[in-house]
Structure formats: structure tokens, C-alpha cells
Image (spheres, helix red, strand yellow):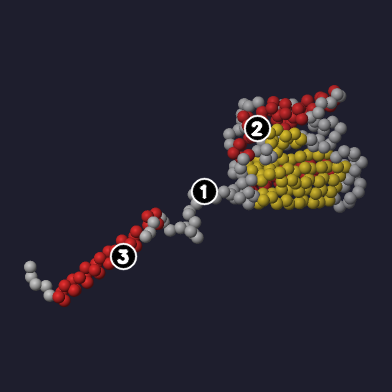
């Protein structure tokens, strides 16, 4: 072995120490960090992990437009006055205008019929339609409009209830045939439920009125509301209650109707 001088030994020793120090620092820097931190992607915002849940659409709001009008004279034959509230959907991203047009069209037909009859009436007549919001979700809007027409000198007014169960995704106003499956006996179920909720009367006329007004015919149950826990049927004045112009109603729970519902309706009700 060759001779190594003292200064060379010192220099070599310093080089070895420097190499060991650098290796030690690198090892310590890696060991001090948790393993998962090395592989974790940076947070999306404010340290929060990205969400995997899709944003749900917000329920619409209901705007009520009012149509008012009156004849030039307010006394004598042909005089009239009307005040009609028209509910309209605000915030429906798809086909909202189509639903609004359908709702407006129904009430416009009522108003047109009223004005036509009012011109031939022998006394002043009034029409009032009041809007009610029953239920609104991101999938379903349930609206009710009660219309009352009265004529001077006539004791009892005429009442009509319009119901609008709006399927927001499919831009349709639901009918009974949309809610219940084809071939089901849902009309018999509605008839039985309705008759059980009306008190029996001893007079043949009253019994016959209830029997006819609740017969298993779709037209008898056309005014319905998909409320939160039950289907509510609103009957026309005098349909099931002779001697009264009020609009009686009955409720049938969804639990009793579940087996008869059409595909997709349960999801619509629980939206």
C-alpha cells in the first residue's frame, strides 16, 4: 500500500462525513412524512375532498299572476266582474313554459265560459279564482285553484276546483291514468275509500247522490292532489253532498294505493 500523507487523510475523512450527512438528511426527511401524504392529490378547495354526489336541482317557486276585469257598468243585466289568480312556475329549467301555458289555458277557458254566460245573465255576476300551493319539490309541483261564480239574487254560488299535479321532468300535468297502472282496479279502491269517509244518510236522495258521485268512473275523481302522504280527491259542489255548494274532499293514503301505482310514480312522490 502507498503512503498517504496526513493532509490527504483529513480531506478524505471530510468527504466521507459529508456524504453520510447528506444521505442521513434525505432519509430523515422521507421518514418524517406519513406515507399517505406522499401519494395524496392536492385538495380541490379549502382542504375539502372532491364530492362524488351530483348536485340536485332546486325546487321551483310559484308566481301568482292576477287577471282582473269588469264590465263598463256594474248594475243590471250583463254586468260582471272577475278576479282570477293564475299560478306559474319559476325556476323550471326544462319545459317550464309549456307547463305554465297548460295551467293558464285551463283557467282561460273557465274565464271565457264565464264571460259568455255573463253577457246573457239577467243580473250581475262575479268570478273569483284563488290559487293555493299544496306541495313543491324538485320533481313535482302540486297546485290548486278554487273558482267561485256567483250571481245576484241566486242563493248558492257555483264552485269548481282545478288541480295541477305537474311532473316537472316530463313536462306533463298528471291524470289519474298517469298515476295508476293500466289494468289495475284503482277506481274500485277510490270508490270504496270515498264512500267510507262520507257519512251515511237516511234519505234515498242523499244515498243516491253519494252512490253516483263516487261510482268507479275516472271523471268522478279527476280533481285530485298528490299531497305529501296521501292522494286527496276534491269533489265538485253537489257531487256527493246534496244541498251544499261546498267542495268536499277525501284522502286515501299512499300505503293503501302503493300496489296500484304506475312505474316511476313512487319516486315522484318521494322527491
Classify residue 186 by image quadrant: top right
Give the residue at the far bottom of this rendering: 7
Q: Position of residue 193 (x, y in %)?
A: 72, 29
Element under label 1? loop
Residue nearest the observer in this picture, 108 or 180: 180
Judge left or right: residue 190 versus residue 240.
left
Q: Position of residue 58 (x, y in %)?
A: 61, 50
Judge left or right: residue 1 versus residue 19.
left
Question: With respect to residue 62, does 178 lie above or below?
Answer: above
Badge 3, how many Cα within 10 Å: few under 14, some, many 20+? Answer: few
Give the labeled residue for mark 3.
25
Whole-number angstrom distance, CA of label 1 to CA of label 3? 43 Å
Along the polypeptide, which appears first: circle 3 or circle 2? Answer: 3
Q: Nearer the viewer, mark 3 or mark 2?
A: 3
In the rendered structure, find residue 53 and report the number of the disc placed on it.
1
Q: Nearer the viewer, mark 1 or mark 3?
A: 3
Figure label count: 3
Classify residue 206 by image quadrant: top right
Give the labeled residue for mark 2.
255
Q: Position of residue 100 (x, y in %)?
A: 67, 47
Amino acid at each position: 500500500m502507498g503512503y498517504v500523507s496526513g493532509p490527504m487523510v483529513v480531506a478524505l475523512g471530510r468527504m466521507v462525513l459529508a456524504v453520510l450527512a447528506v444521505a442521513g438528511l434525505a432519509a430523515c426527511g422521507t421518514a418524517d412524512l406519513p406515507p399517505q401524504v406522499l401519494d395524496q392529490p392536492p385538495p380541490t378547495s379549502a382542504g375539502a375532498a372532491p364530492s362524488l354526489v351530483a348536485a340536485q336541482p332546486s325546487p321551483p317557486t310559484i308566481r301568482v299572476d292576477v287577471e282582473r276585469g269588469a264590465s263598463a257598468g256594474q248594475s243590471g243585466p250583463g254586468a260582471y266582474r272577475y278576479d282570477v289568480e293564475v299560478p306559474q312556475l319559476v325556476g323550471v329549467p326544462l319545459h317550464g313554459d309549456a307547463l305554465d301555458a297548460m295551467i293558464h289555458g285551463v283557467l282561460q277557458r273557465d274565464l271565457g265560459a264565464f264571460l259568455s254566460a255573463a253577457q246573457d245573465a239577467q243580473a250581475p255576476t262575479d268570478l273569483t279564482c284563488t290559487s293555493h300551493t299544496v306541495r313543491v319539490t324538485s320533481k313535482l309541483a302540486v297546485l290548486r285553484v278554487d273558482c267561485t261564480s256567483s250571481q245576484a239574487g241566486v242563493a248558492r254560488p257555483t264552485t269548481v276546483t282545478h288541480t295541477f299535479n305537474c311532473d316537472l321532468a316530463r313536462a306533463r300535468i298528471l291524470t289519474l291514468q298517469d298515476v295508476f297502472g293500466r289494468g289495475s282496479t284503482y277506481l274500485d279502491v277510490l270508490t270504496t275509500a270515498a264512500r267510507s269517509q262520507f257519512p251515511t244518510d237516511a234519505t234515498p236522495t242523499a244515498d243516491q247522490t253519494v252512490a253516483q258521485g263516487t261510482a268507479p268512473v275516472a271523471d268522478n275523481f279527476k280533481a285530485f292532489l298528490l299531497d305529501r302522504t296521501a292522494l286527496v280527491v276534491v269533489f265538485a259542489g253537489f257531487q256527493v253532498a246534496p244541498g251544499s255548494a261546498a267542495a268536499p274532499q277525501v284522502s286515501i293514503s299512499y300505503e293503501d294505493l302503493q300496489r296500484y301505482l304506475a312505474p316511476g310514480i313512487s319516486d315522484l312522490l318521494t322527491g
